[in-house]
Image: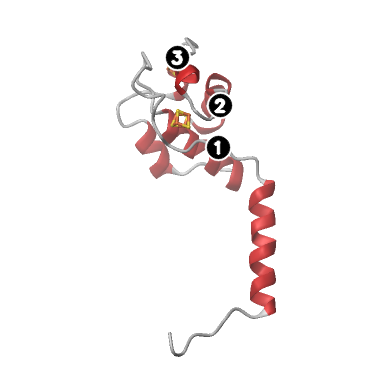
Amino acid sequence: MKDFVALNDVERQAIVQTCKLLKATPLVGCTACKYCVDGCPKHINIPQWFECLNTFRTYGKTDVWEIGAAKRNGTLASHCIGCGKCEQACPQKLPIRQLLKETAEKCE
Ligand code: SF4
Ligand code: SF4
């Protein structure tokens, strides 16, 4: 640390600006706790699909590796039958069924 150089004002301003832009993107607040996954009768990788949706919301396109991880057990967001079990388990109270519909439209 003896050669440590603190951020200058321009660099600090760039970070503040980047934070503002990122906060302006409405991302799904999924923490990937996976409490929703075990009870899903269709075994959907819910948090992994939400990662795909967040990538889409941020960059306007999905990431093939994230999609591959989400469908690795052969399930899709569109396989949701709307039973609602996941929403009862979600500590973030996310509208999972509605978000999976959006995920299916944009990411599959
Ligand atoms: S609502 Fe859909 S995602 Fe949620 S537990 Fe039921 S089938 Fe799975
Ligand atoms: S329970 Fe909610 S916060 Fe946790 S992984 Fe599932 S959707 Fe995300």
| Quarter assignment of residue 14 | bottom right
Would you say 6 lies left or right of 24 here?
A: left
Whether residue 2 is situated above or below residue 70 in the rendered picture: below
| Callout 3: SS | helix
Q: Is the residue under label 3 in contact with that under label 1 (CB below 8 Å)? A: no
Where does residue 77 sit, x and y in percent of width and height?
46, 24
In the rendered image of this protein, does residue 9 appear above or below residue 52? below
The residue shown at (63%, 52%) is 22
Horizontal side of 10 relative to 89 (left or right) equals: right
Determine whether label 1 and label 2 are within 8 Å by CB.
Answer: yes
Q: Which residue is mark 3?
A: 85
**Residues under labels 1 and 2: Cα distance?**
8 Å
Residue holding disc 2: 94
Tag 1 residue:
29
Question: Around disc 1, counting alpha carbons within 10 Å, would you say few (fewer than 14), some (14 to 19), or many (20 or more)?
Answer: few
Q: Between residue 54 and residue 31, name the one nearer to us.
A: 31
Mark 3 residue CB less than 8 A from any atom of ligand 1:
yes
The residue lying at 69 percent from left, 55 percent from top is: 20
Q: Is 64 located above or below residue 80 in the figure?
A: below
- Label 1 CB sits under 8 Å from any ligand 2 atom: yes
Q: Is mark 2 within 8 Å of ligand 2?
A: yes
First in sequence, mark 3 or 2: give its number.
3
Q: Quadrant of ligand 1?
A: top left
**N-term-proximal mark, 1 vs 3:** 1
Looking at numbered disc 1 in the image, what kind of residue is underneath it? Gly
